[in-house]
Image: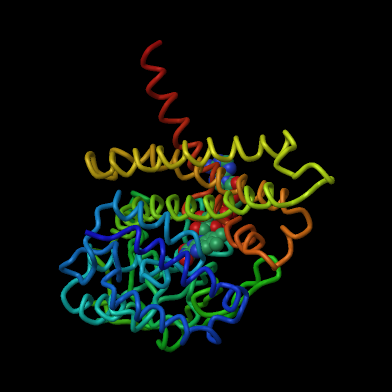
Amino acid sequence: MINYKEIKSFIQDTIIPKEKDWVGKPFYSIESELNTFRNIVKQNNWWTPQLDKDSGGLGLTLSEHAKLLEILGMTPFGCYLFNSHAPDAGNMELLEMAGNKKQKEEYLKPLVNGDIRSCFAMTEPDLAGSNPVRMGTIAVKEGDNYIINGKKWFTTAADGSKFTIVMAVTNDENENPYAKSSMIIVPTNAKGYTIERNISIMGHANEGWFSHSEITFKNVKVPITNLLGNEGEGFKLAQKRLGPGRIHHCMRWMGICERAFDMMCERAITRKISDTEYLGDKQLVQDFIAVSRAEIDAAKLYIIDTANKMEMLGHKEARLQISAVKFYAAGVLQKVIDRSIQVHGALGITDDTILSFFYREERGARIYDGADEAHKTALAKRILKEKKKEY
Ligand SMILES: Cc1cc2nc3c(=O)[nH]c(=O)nc-3n(C[C@H](O)[C@H](O)[C@H](O)COP(=O)(O)OP(=O)(O)OC[C@H]3O[C@@H](n4cnc5c(N)ncnc54)[C@H](O)[C@@H]3O)c2cc1C
């Protein structure tokens, strides 16, 4: 059984004090120091909590892992240090689920060991990612190989990855748009695979695990044995990858919320606004604190309920609640960080606190893994369909 209390102390007393040396620094300049702490995590048997024991993980259930992610989410480095970071965690789950023996040996094993990193390339700059059935990247069979051509972007952590799992059209003739694409493993040293740039986000491009890249595939040749699962199964696998992934993100966001909330309270208690009053004496600041507390607690209960439903009923049955909790939790995250910044005044937007990093890096939460609007539409459509039956 994992000791959450010990892990919380490790994050709060050892990792958070180190943050000031790491946040905003180029990834490769801090990688070896991060590795020192990854080794401590390994020695403590906290490594890769999300994977089955047979694959080298701790075998935590989704709910147990969610509880842990709330602790790890308090710092941007938590998941990385525990080998449960995106996109590697999702790729490990994909390989565990759909990889054959050779693929597991070649790609899953070194990921679990933490020897390599990987990335996942689905979104394209020229076509709406919210409707990924329209995909421009094509993989054509030629003898025993696939020849891949296309362009991807926002491929998180591509810089320095050993391989990418790319989503490409392999079965364009299939009438079902969800059965046209496949997932293919592409080693990043393959000829014709090029990282064009690490995309700058709000002034910060960074590198390595902390980057998002634009990639081109020009006649990239890989053996057909690099196919993950069966041809045309890309979306089926993507759905399986995204369900637990969304819950992981939601709970990690709650760790960020708790951190931002604690900072907001500390500032409210310690910042004097007059000779006799502190910020926390002002009712508008009290409103920020009260509403944030209620929203964080509501989001957490909703996340846990969703995780329980996924465990009891399966991902498919719980998919609409996954959609709902994803946009709800992302909204709470954004509001709580924003309120905490507001209570800090000008200090809140400087890089002297972690808040500006969270504000910048987590704005994407309402976009990645399905934009708010896509999830809301799916949920509302289903509700209205059911309601119509009553009339
Ligand atoms: C930080 C970050 C990391 C990412 N990492 C990866 C990665 O590792 N690999 C990868 O493949 N992709 C990644 N992505 C890309 C992400 O999956 C896409 O950005 C997302 O799917 C949305 O696609 P899009 O950006 O093309 O937006 P579009 O599809 O062009 O949508 C734009 C906007 O339109 C609105 N919209 C969309 N659908 C609807 C609808 N049904 N009704 C009403 N309005 C709608 C929404 O407001 C949406 O934000 C990442 C993105 C971010 C921000």
Residue 107 horizontal/vertical position (percent): 28, 78
Coloration of the structure image: rainbow
* Quarter location, residue 361: bottom right
Residue 235 horizontal/vertical position (percent): 34, 55
Furthest-front residue in this view: 276
Residue 321 horizontal/vertical position (percent): 38, 37
Residue 100 horizontal/vertical position (percent): 18, 72
Residue 128 can be seen, yes or no: no
Instruction: Give the residue at x 56% y 79%.
Output: 207
Judge whether 250 appears above or below 325 on screen: below
Query: Where, quadrant-wise, is the N terminus in this rendering?
Result: bottom left
Residue situated in front as seen by the camera: 342 or 6: 6
Furthest-right residue in this view: 274
Query: Where, quadrant-wise, is the C terminus in this rendering?
Result: top left
Q: If the picture is divided into quarters, which one holds ligand 1?
A: bottom right
Question: Is 23 on the left-hand or right-hand side of 1?
Answer: right
Instruction: Give the residue at x 69% y 68%.
Output: 352
Residue situated in front as seen by the camera: 102 or 64: 64
Question: Is 207 on the left-hand or right-hand side of 221?
Answer: right
Residue situated in front as seen by the camera: 115 or 295: 295
Instruction: Give the residue at x 63% y 52%.
Output: 266
Question: Is 53 on the left-hand or right-hand side of 322?
Answer: left
Residue 388 can be seen, yes or no: yes
Q: How many numbered marks, from 0 up?
A: 0
Judge whether 116 appears above or below 244 on screen: below
Instruction: Give the residue at x 48% y 71%.
Output: 15
* Quarter location, residue 164: bottom left
Judge whether 151 appears above or below 190 on screen: above
